[in-house]
């Protein structure tokens, strides 16, 4: 197995797009063309994939922002789930970003799926923030969505919450 930064020119790009679109509902992801443009032109946006030869096992897309790393999407192929690969990808990301604070959004712990996802991230060492947070929509006219933030550095998030929120909203979602 190997880790690789994926771009639209990568041989597995179509498989990454297929996993992206099948793993996230329409309202929780960008248009594929927009995602492709980001991967081609934005130097602080990256897609890290785990490959076994030419077989895509999973990916994590992230933004290298000032003072922290923001994980936007994280997916493991359905045929490779529950094999510890999500943990491997996350550990690889931590090494790649030199253990800088990592922040990501999760659904509030109101469903069994959300609680299971939060528990997975907690096993990776992330903490769930109690700070109220709204995710901007990916498309004009859609609604803002109440989510929670999780982080590898709770003290950093607590002391910088407003700056982190502004940075995510402005850089990732393009809103002030």
Image (tube, rainbow, N blue to C red):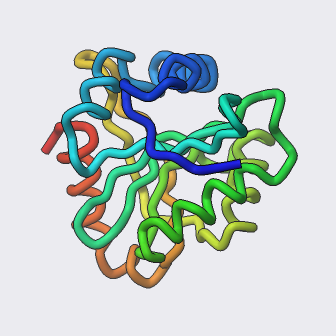
Position above or below: 121 against 75? below
Q: Nearer the viewer, residue 46 or 26?
A: 46
Residue 124 vs residue 149: left or right? right
Q: Residue at x 81, y 36 (%)?
A: 80
Tell me where residue 25 appears, x and y as whole percent: 55, 20
Tell me where residue 138 appears, x and y as whole percent: 32, 26
Position above or below: 135 against 150? above
Residue 84 vs residue 157: left or right? right
Position above or below: 43 against 113? below
Location of residue 164 by image quarter: bottom left
Q: Nearer the viewer, residue 24 or 114?
A: 24
Q: Residue at x 64, y 50 (%)?
A: 2
Residue at the extreme front of the image, as rendered: 53
Tell me where residue 50 appears, x and y as whole percent: 63, 44
Q: Nearer the viewer, residue 75 or 92?
A: 92
Pick the quarter of the image with the C terminus: top left
Q: Residue at x 62, y 25 (%)?
A: 23
Location of residue 87 by image quarter: bottom right
Q: Nearer the viewer, residue 131 or 40?
A: 40
Q: Residue at x 27, y 60 (%)?
A: 65
Location of residue 37 by image quarter: top left
Residue at the extreme right of the image, as rendered: 82
Residue 9 vs residue 96: left or right? left
Q: How many marks?
A: 0
């Amino acid at each position: 197995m190997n880790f690789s930064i994926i771009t639209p020119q990568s041989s597995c790009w179509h498989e990454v797009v297929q996993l992206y679109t099948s793993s996230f509902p329409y309202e929780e992801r960008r248009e594929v063309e927009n995602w492709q443009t980001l991967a081609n032109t934005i130097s602080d946006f990256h897609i890290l994939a785990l490959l076994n030869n030419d077989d895509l096992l999973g990916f994590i897309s992230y933004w290298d922002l000032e003072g922290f790393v923001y994980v936007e999407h994280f997916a493991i192929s359905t045929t490779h789930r529950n094999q510890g690969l999500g943990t491997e990808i996350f550990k690889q990301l931590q090494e790649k970003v030199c253990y800088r604070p990592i922040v990501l959004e999760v659904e509030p712990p109101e469903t069994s799926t959300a609680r299971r996802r939060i528990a997975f991230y907690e096993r990776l060492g992330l903490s769930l923030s109690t700070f109220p947070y709204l995710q901007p929509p990916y498309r004009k006219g859609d609604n803002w969505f109440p989510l929670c933030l999780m982080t590898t550095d709770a003290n950093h998030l607590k002391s910088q919450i407003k700056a982190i929120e502004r940075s995510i909203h402005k850089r990732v979602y393009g809103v002030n």
